[in-house]
Amino acid sequence: MRIRYALLILFCGHAIPATSQQVPPPADSLIEHSLRMFDINPFEWSGTPDPLRPRLGVYTQEVPYDSLRTISGVASGTKGFRIWHLMPNWAADAGGLFIGDVILAVDGLPSGDSVYQADEFIGNRAREMRAGQTMTFTIVRDNTVRTVAVPLIVPERTPMIPPTTDRLGPIRAGSWLQGMLQSSSLTEWAKTIQRQMRIVADQEFSTVSFAGRPGPWRLSAVTYLHRAPTRVGAFSRLITSDIWNGLDSMRGLSGVVAAAALHLDVPIVPTASTSPSNIEEMRVVLDNANALVRRALSPINPNGLASAREIGMLLDMSSDWEVALENVADANVRRSTRIGEEQRIGALFAAADKIDRIALFDGATMLAALADSTLIDRIMGAVVSPKKIPRNTSEGEILQEWMSSAGRCVIGGAGANFYEGEYGFIFDIGGDDSYILQPALASTARVVIDVAGDDLYRADSSGQGSGIFSIDVLIDRRGNDVYRGTMWSQGAGVLGVGILSDLAGDDIYKSRWGSQGAAFHGIGILHDEAGADTYIAEVYSQGFGYVRGFGAIIEERGNDSYRAGWKYPDSRVPNRAHLSLSQGFGYGMRPWSTGVGGDGGIGVLTDRTGDDLYAADFFSQGCSYWYAIGILHDREGADRYTAGQYSQGSGIHLSFGALLDDAGDDMYDAYAGLEQGNAHDWSAGCLEDFQGNDTYRGSTSSQGSALTVSIAWLLDTKGNDQYFINPTDTTTSQGAGTVARLRGGGSLGMLVDLGKGSDYYVEPRVVEGRPLLKSNRGIVYDDGRK
């Protein structure tokens, strides 16, 4: 047995060159390495797909016995289960059950038996029935016993489309996982997981139609991973590789915009790079870009800007519309209020669906190419000439100005200038400048270029590369700059494209939410080329992709610090936990409070080199929620990661998350569970660290832990590593799966350490060179020491 596994590891590691120093191998090699470790044949039906089951959509919790004793008609000892949530428009909600109802019996039977209770019992009974059949609930409502007949509803299958080309190529025969599953008699176990994930790949959970077609915003990348969940590490590396290849091979950030558009299922070919050498040629580029923006956004004018702003505010936690809806006490008022919200959000999404994304992204690639030091220096040389005489104004020195359809355009001089209000174009040649700019005008393309100086950028709402129903590009050539925003700032797109590119300097980025590479139905990019930079945000930031959005931070070099969270408490760990939803976080609108659903986007934080600090809390660091993808990728450096629950390579609720670290002696810390290669609810998540002497500190359901029909792993390929968890939780941590009784399946969690290093595990059953199989279907494998 040992010989067989040794051969498998030798084969799987074939593509990775041996290195004496911590120089990360090429991205293609790391992609191949992940595939040769975890690739398995996907599941596909040979005939008719499995029938879909009825969806009841009821969540309950048991009530105390004495709470029912005074109610007439309730027998002594009867258990009751209060409904605390109903899925909007599902069978239970449509059939007339209310939140607050207490369920006493189902079809005349107590809502529980010796094996199943409450939700599991009710769910099992519904699964055994068919569409059109009726479940009869005996409930208590308003202190009165009554019955409610609920006709069952079965959703329709909605075939979703994967990418037209599988860029990862054919399945790698003889992978480590294939061999492990076969030798451990786990092939059928894994196939059950794949089968269920294949089913949800073609399901639409939104019950309110807004685009005239089902599943209108499901990304093909998400569908692909539901069909091939063990490729989440390789596919996440493909996404980050596309970003870096786009940056390295094309002028400025035009290749990055093209890569983002590709993964949003809008493949575009960037126009031949326009390289203006003077202001007159720059004006032509701006006019062309503005023409594209007007064409892209005209289908929803004249109210497009108002729609974009209202869409953007759906994530405002300071006035959370979902909490307000759920706090409506009266069930009938709550239902009518919900229907009103469904109509409002449905109308907003219907409008958003009409924009011409090809034209929008074409215009963005045209302007993204301007984020190029050589090009900026060439224009600078044309601007600074003896013929230009500065004119002193309240703004400072102005060399030239004109009006355009995008607003006032100026060329600023070498002194300290102050810009406030609306501008369509600024080219400032130097000085320590201050900017308090209004957002770009609706349906316009704006560019701000600052050549030199330690500058201050401030926005009371949105700004600094904030494409809200527009394209907004901010480029800072050099200087130690400070950026202060509030929402949808610092490289953010909402029904638009926002780009912030800082090419040199030790910079500070601070904003509240929806910022620092964030997007909602658009593209948001924050690119920093060099310097020791600091990023601070509260929530929904630092590589955040919401519905149909691609948000990314692209950091080239420097020892950087990222901090997100500590504003909005999470009740799961009182007095400690806070929401982050940042640092490579993909997010969708789950149809939970209303029946409107929007499948999620792609959030990426990728840092090329430097000793970096990542600090966040719940939902962060390569995490995702609801048909989305979240990626945190660090190419090189001794890094420190700290986070809370659902973090560090975690796919949650039909989603996919990956934390990828290619080189460096790293430290991973997390608390509260579900971290460091984790997945839950028809999802997949991974943490892949290629080389370095690393330390992992988790809590529960950590380090290769899969829950509720999912697949997860932690893979460390080289180095002397240490794995710490709660010592009483080796059952669900360090390579662990679980059984989901109601779903008739389980999960597969893996912890794999290669490289023949000197490693430490809290799990006492690990024997080097021999796989450890856990009863709920977990695998731990350490290939031993040299």
Image: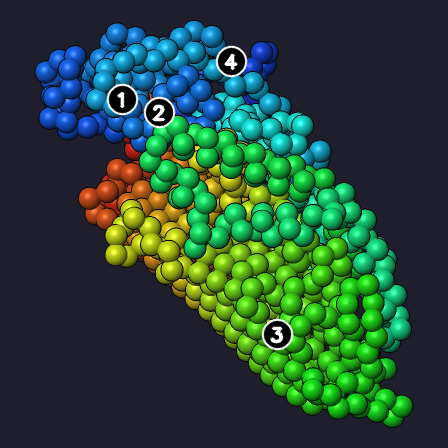
**Decide: marks 2, 1 in contact (CB < 8 A)?**
yes
Badge 2 or badge 1: first in the primary sequence:
2
| Mark 1 or mark 3, whichever is nearer to me | 1
Label 3 – label 4 distance at C-alpha: 58 Å
Q: Secondary structure at mark 2?
A: loop
Identify the disc placed on residue 436: 3
Q: Secondary structure at mark 3?
A: strand
**Decide: marks 2, 3 in contact (CB < 8 A)?**
no
User: Badge 1 is on which residue?
Assistant: 141
Kind of residue at badge 3: Ile
Horizontal relation, residue 550 to residue 742: left or right: right
| Mark 2 or mark 3, whichever is nearer to me | 2
| Residue 396, placed above or below residue 77 | below
Horizontal relation, residue 770 to residue 455: left or right: left
User: Badge 4 is on which residue?
Assistant: 51
Badge 3 or badge 4: first in the primary sequence:
4
